[in-house]
Amino acid sequence: MRVLFAPDSFKGAIGSVDAATALMEGWASVRGDDNLVAMPQADGGEGTLDVLAACSPDSSWSVASSVCGPDGRPVDARWLTLADGRAVVELAESSGIALMGKLDPFGATTRGLGEVLRACESDRVSVALGGSASTDGGLGVLRVLGVRVLDANGADVPEGAAGLVAARAVDVSELAWVPSDVEVLTDTRAVLCGTDGAAQVFGPQKGASGDDIAVLDEALARWAGLLADAGLPADPGLPGTGAAGGTGFGLVALGARIAGGAERVSELTGLVAAVPSADLVVTGEGKFDRTSLTGKLVGHVVQICSHASVPVVVVAGAVDVESDVPSVSLTDLAGGSDAAMADARGWLVEAGRAVAMRD
């Protein structure tokens, strides 16, 4: 029997790579002769690099040393080069909210992401957006690539959303290297501005108050006009442009295309190609609920399996939905959510055993 283990991360408890390993270990303790394959998945946000590396033995790591972190402090940021030469960059490595000493909705910048893009020097790049600290519309990235952003007096604006608020003109005459093939991986359909825009949807988690959000939203709308006037037009209503505080929009203005994170990662990891020859796929996430089957990674894996007529089982920290898809709850196995969270790996091993005994 050939079984693929393709979970998402269990947020706050265990990453997808370790989750896949634990599930596989549990299965092997019951049915050790089966052909077991770990194929952890991600939605294009944090953890995407680790997932791709785990599924791509011929990939290679590189590090951009001392790039500008989101709060200006230097950080080392990894990127991955796949066997076919495509570079994969993860925004969270250089400009992620987890790197902040404290939240700073107007000061946090994406400059480090631009520095990583310059360092990798690949013409084919996938940029995983997620976990960003800033709402700067990608201003930091564009400046590294040679775009000048000027205030009302013709001076260079500061970093971050503060620069976006001050911006009144854009000069692209010194725009330098831009990869010819850039795709943006995102799990959000947020647009640049408005009710479903970057500031409104994600501003609060980055420390923005209600008044801040109004200022940021206005600045993002003006940013779209400034880039268009400078010859870098993009549609601010395109789903995904609001990803990572509008960084998606900034990259689209440079010619990038937006791709669904879960869909593209499942292609890059080889999951899409591997499912038809599998006898079973085991996927999973922190909470399996009514939203899981409508746009989340687990729902995408279930859809792939449905199209290939391959059985699938969902293992989740908690199950809060009635579904035809078989599922196993770590909370039920552990006797409570606290116990499940306290030893997620151990209970994933138990879940692997439980699924193996059922199948």
Image (tube, helix red, strand yellow):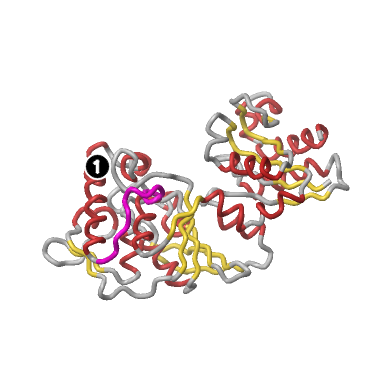
In this rendered view, identify the residue nearer to me: 167 or 180. Answer: 180
| Mark 1 residue type | Asp
Looking at the rendering, which quadrant does residue 217 occupy? top left
In this rendered view, identify the residue nearer to me: 120 or 230. Answer: 230
- What residue sits 41% from the left and 56% below the top? 95
- What residue sits 71% from the left and 38% below the top? 312
- What residue sits 58% from the left and 54% below the top? 265
Q: Residue furthest left?
A: 153
319 in relation to 74, above or below: above
User: Does residue 309 appear anywhere in the picture?
Assistant: yes
Q: Secondary structure at mark 1?
A: helix
Q: x, y percentage for residue 168? A: 17, 59
320 in relation to 305, above or below: above
- What residue sits 56% from the left and 65% below the top? 80
Looking at the rendering, which quadrant does residue 153 occupy? bottom left
Read off the residue under disc 1.
212
- Residue range in magenta is 231-243
The total number of labels drawn is 1
Circle 1 residues within 10 Å: few <14, some 14–19, many ≥20: some
In this rendered view, identify the residue nearer to me: 167 or 297. Answer: 297
Q: Indicate yes or no whether the magenta region holds residue 18.
A: no
Name the chief secondary structure element in magenta.
loop
In this image, 1 relative to 67: left or right? right
User: Does residue 45 appear anywhere in the picture?
Assistant: no
Q: What quarter of the picture does the C terminus occupy?
A: top right
238 in relation to 143, above or below: above
Q: x, y percentage for residue 271? A: 66, 52
Q: x, y percentage for residue 228? A: 25, 61
Q: x, y percentage for residue 221? A: 24, 50
Q: Residue furthest right?
A: 33
